Image (spheres, rainbow, N blue to C red):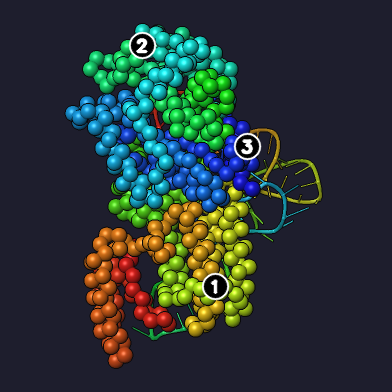
Amino acid sequence: MLKVYNTLTGKKEEFKPHRDGQVNMYVCGPTVYNYIHLGNARPLVVFDTVRRYLIHKGYKVKYVQNFTDVDDKIINRAKEEGVLPLELSKKYIEEYFKDADALNIMRADYHPLVSENISDIIHFIQLLIEKGYAYEAEGDVYFKVRKFEGYGKLSGRSFDDMLAGARVEVNEKKQDPLDFALWKKAKEGELNWNSPWGEGRPGWHIECSVMAHKYLGDCIDIHGGGYDLVFPHHENEIAQSEAALGKQFVKYWMHNGFITVNKEKMSKSLGNFFLVRDILKKFRPEAVRFYLLSTHYRSPLDFDDEKLESFQNGLRRLENAWELLDERLEGFDKSDSLRDDKTGNNVPELLTEKSLSFEQAMDDDFNTALAIAVWFDLVKEVNIFLKRMDENDQKAKGMLLGFKELFLMFNEVLGIFKTDDTGKLKSKADEDNMQNSNLINRLMEIIIDLRQKAREEKDWDTADGIRDRLKELGIILEDTPQGVRWKLNR
RNA sequence: GGCGACGUAGCCAAGUGGUAAGGCAGAGGACUGCAAAUCCUUUAUUCCCCGGUUCGAAUCCGGGCGUCGCCUCCA
């Protein structure tokens, strides 16, 4: 049974979507005025993994992630660069996909833009005005917070609490300092659209309410985002949506914890952020994703190079086992049955057990840290099995296939490694250049042949020299009982 | 000031009443011509501190210390 921690109730709850077998998910996407940083990447990876697991559980998942392409920061940045705001956001949306693809994030079913949904937003605001939840004031439109009874239920605060913060914006036009903008009157020459209240643009919170309803209907099962969006963003979304439609907006609210640097929140205002693309210059994307999933999604995650490095090392252990499995399965006819082997292990039982443990971990509010531990347990079993198995035992090979299928299942959910159609790991070289890698393969055959001759003659200086020099080039040679293996040091 | 989270080995981290998972790093051994990979063994008598509840607590309660977050754009 899948349990999900719901910010709204502060508890883990049994997950039951509105409709059997179908899940509607909405995740707040980035404001596109810059490349994404690691803090932006965490919710992407976390909710992508949530989505993958729900699919694994057999749900049909409809997934929507917006881009905020109309916003003060975009307007200011565009002005600085001398481009149009929507040109700027278009560029960063393209760049966003490069980073997201590297991290193996599945595309959403819809990636709506604010700029393409203005008329729906205007209609929604009109509805709120008609219902008495919003009012126009000199070209702006505000939401009447005190009119909405449940205000504060997500973030757990009262009106007094909010005022006690005393950092509410001073604005003469508002009837109440807590009211927030649904529509902002455009400044001279600024990006704007026509509306019943004159030229202007939408406030930040309204876009998510409108687009969530537009693309997912009234039954939104999961709404996700960073913990810092709980208040005011998500609180305001609830107010707008429930005031307008008179029914529960979202069933499960999920929020990921922050990435920190030296234990402080990574944020643009503190200037302690690291762009995903800069991190990827030093580390493999698989390692970044692995690292982001190594801690439970609601806990803070502290970042520095040494930590990421240690995860990259750990990644190799998973990868080695995967490659060893592929190597031993080379040319194996998959039609052979999965039965007992000669090693005395009851492998099918082991596979069932690991598969169950993995699902139990993920069922418990997506405990990826535990799920990864199960994967490592499995790696150990694979290595032991590989060591003991008889090379000619076809049944044992069938067993390897069982291990491999579990690897593929774990990976499908966690999304760490990229694979080709046959389930083999996609190597960096393959991705970069297929033809070159073919040439390298043939050159390596020659080099290995020559080195083997030297080894036969016990010319260790030559043999080791070749190995050392290849290592300098980033190629690892291993002399194994099954022959010489080589791979790129990634 | 209000609200909330967290504190488990050198590092990362799971575990919310039954006697401390997993990974990285380190040590010893096996295998190897030497390595690499892998396997075996090993690394917290103890979970920030002090009290309490309990047959039993890292886990529950009270107090303290420390760190961080939200209350303002922020994933």
Residue at x 39%, y 19% (from the top left corner): A122
Q: Which residue is mark 3?
A: A11
- The label on residue A226 is none
User: Which type of secondary structure does the marked residue at label 1 adopt?
Assistant: helix
At x 55% / y 64%, what residue is drawn?
A377
Left or right side of A484 for A59: right
Task: Work out whether residue A312 can be spotted.
Answer: no
Which is nearer the N-term, disc 2 or disc 3?
3
Kindly identify which residue carries mark 1.
A399
Residue A407 percent across, percent down from the top left: 49, 62
Identified by mark 1, the residue type is: Met
Is residue B37 placed above or below A482 in the rendered structure? above
Relative side of B56 to B37, left or right: right
Mark 2: which secondary structure?
A: loop
Report which quarter residue A282 is drawn in.
Answer: bottom left
Chain letter, disc 2 residue: A
Task: Give how far across and how far down residue A274 sits, in percent.
Answer: 34, 43
Label 3: state its secondary structure: strand
State the image quarter where residue A388 is shown.
Answer: bottom right
User: For the residue carrying disc 2, how many other residues have a C-alpha within 10 Å: few (<14), some (14-19), or many (20+)?
Assistant: some
Q: Point out which mark residue A197 bears.
A: 2
